[in-house]
Structures are given as structure tokens and as C-alpha cells.
Amino acid sequence: MTENKQITESDLPAGLAKPAQRALLTAGYLQLEQIAKVSEVEILKLHGMGPKALEQLRNALDAKGLSFANRA
């Protein structure tokens, strides 16, 4: 059995598509608290991020009482 420690260090949504996960991890975003410090526009600029992934992140942030920066 092998363990993937990256999953335990990250609290990104489990159902997030692989391209979106790679985009976030490549940009250095492992935690939702880090994502809450940037705007939706900045996240959408990452290659691999789309509307569905953004909605999943929005829901995950909301569940933790967080939101994207500069969100009304």
C-alpha cells in the first residue's frame, strides 16, 4: 500500500477535476485558505480551471466560511 501525502496536506474539493487540481497545485495552492486570498478572476486565469471547477471551489470555500477575495 502506498500513501499519497499530498492529499492529506491539501483540503481541495475531492471531486475537483485533475486538470484543475494540477493548475492549483502548480500555482502553489494547497489549502482553501490560500485560495481565499485571491480573486475568482485570478483563479480562472490558471490553465485547467473552468466554470465547474470554480463553482466547486466556491462551494468548498462557503462550507468553511470563506470566500474568494474581492467577492461582493
Image (spheres, rainbow, N blue to C red):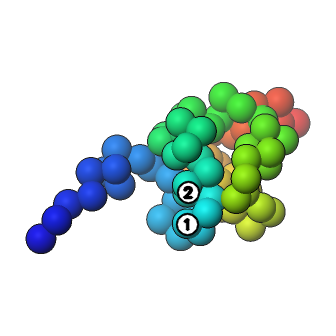
Which amino acid, mark 1?
Answer: Lys
**Would you say 72 lies left or right of 48 here?**
right
Q: In this figure, what is the number of numbered marks?
A: 2
Determine the residue positioned at 79% across, 49% down.
Answer: 44
64 or 52: which is nearer to us? 52
Residue farthest to the right? 72
* Quadrant the N terminus occupies: bottom left
Residue on which the image places disc 2 = 21
64 or 1: which is nearer to us? 1
Q: Secondary structure at mark 1?
A: helix
Determine the residue positioned at 59% across, 68% down.
Answer: 17
* Residue 23 visible: yes
Q: Are marks 2 and 1 in contact (CB under 8 Å)?
A: yes
Residue on which the image places disc 1 = 18
Determine the residue positioned at 55% across, 44% down.
Answer: 26
The percent position of residue 7, horizontal first and vertical second, equals: 35, 55
**Badge 1 local density, few (<14 within 10 Å), some, or many (20+)?**
few
The percent position of residue 66, horizontal first and vertical second, equals: 63, 39
Determine the residue positioned at 87% across, 36% down.
Answer: 72
Is 4 situated above or below 27?
below
**Would you say 52 lies left or right of 25 here?**
right
Residue 28's disc is: none
Which amino acid, mark 2?
Answer: Gln
Q: Separation of disc 2 and disc 1 at Cα?
A: 5 Å
